[in-house]
Image (spheres, rainbow, N blue to C red):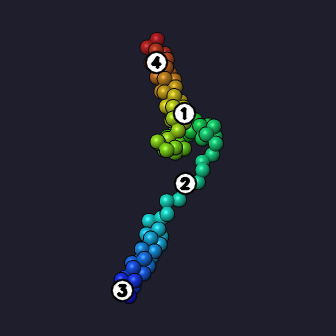
């Protein structure tokens, strides 16, 4: 009987130590620090897109991915820039033909 009690205590100690070291090695699943307000993130993303810093775009994480309004705004802004570039190219090519 004493052997069983010692085995259970040893097993419990191993579980506690294993959990502690697992948390130290792989982390405890801390939540990321909160980002700026969504409007601030949208404005920052617009500035980055306007400056051509597409790698600097960031989105706030939500349970199913990213905030859709932030992604939609970046896509809309990128589409606007592409349309403006295409319009400018058309104007310049017309100017060269004349």
Q: Is residue 34 above or below residue 72?
A: below
Q: Are marks 4 and 3 in contact (CB under 8 Å)?
A: no
The x, y position of residue 4, in whole percent, is 36, 83
Q: Work out which residue is located at the far bottom of the displayed protein and give it.
A: 2
Earlier residue among tags 4 and 2: 2
Q: Is residue 2 above or below residue 15?
A: below
Query: Residue 38 bears which disc, if any?
Result: none
Q: Are marks 1 and 2 in contact (CB under 8 Å)?
A: no
The x, y position of residue 24, in whole percent, is 48, 70
The x, y position of residue 23, in whole percent, is 47, 68
Q: CA distance from mark 4 to mark 3?
A: 90 Å
Residue at the image point whose x is 52% and y is 26% from the top = 80
Q: How many marks?
A: 4
Query: Residue 1 bears which disc, if any?
Result: 3
Q: Which residue is mark 1?
A: 69
Residue at the image point whose x is 51% and y is 28% from the top = 76
> Could you classify mark 1 by the number of other residues whose Cα lies within 10 Å: few (under 14), some (14-19), or many (20 or more)?
few
Q: CA distance from mark 1 to mark 3?
A: 64 Å
Q: Are marks 1 and 3 in contact (CB under 8 Å)?
A: no
Q: Which residue is mark 4?
A: 90
Q: Secondary structure at mark 2?
A: loop
**Which mark's residue is nearer the viewer, 1 or 3?**
3
79 relative position to 43: left or right: left
Earlier residue among tags 1 and 3: 3
Q: Work out which residue is located at the far front of the displayed protein and give it.
A: 1
Earlier residue among tags 4 and 3: 3
Q: Which residue is mark 2?
A: 32
Instruction: Work out whether residue 84 or residue 68 is closer to the camera in this orientation and state it.
Output: 68
Q: Quadrant of the N terminus?
A: bottom left
The x, y position of residue 18, in whole percent, is 42, 73
């Amino acid at each position: 009987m004493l052997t069983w009690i010692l085995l259970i205590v040893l097993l419990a100690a191993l579980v506690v130590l294993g959990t502690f070291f697992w948390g130290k090695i792989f982390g405890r699943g801390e939540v990321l620090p909160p980002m700026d307000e969504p409007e601030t993130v949208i404005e920052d993303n617009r500035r980055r897109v306007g400056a051509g810093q597409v790698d600097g775009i960031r989105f706030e994480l939500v349970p199913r991915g990213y905030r859709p309004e932030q992604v939609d705004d970046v896509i809309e802004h990128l589409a606007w820039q592409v349309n403006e570039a295409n319009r400018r190219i058309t104007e310049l090519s017309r100017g060269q033909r004349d």
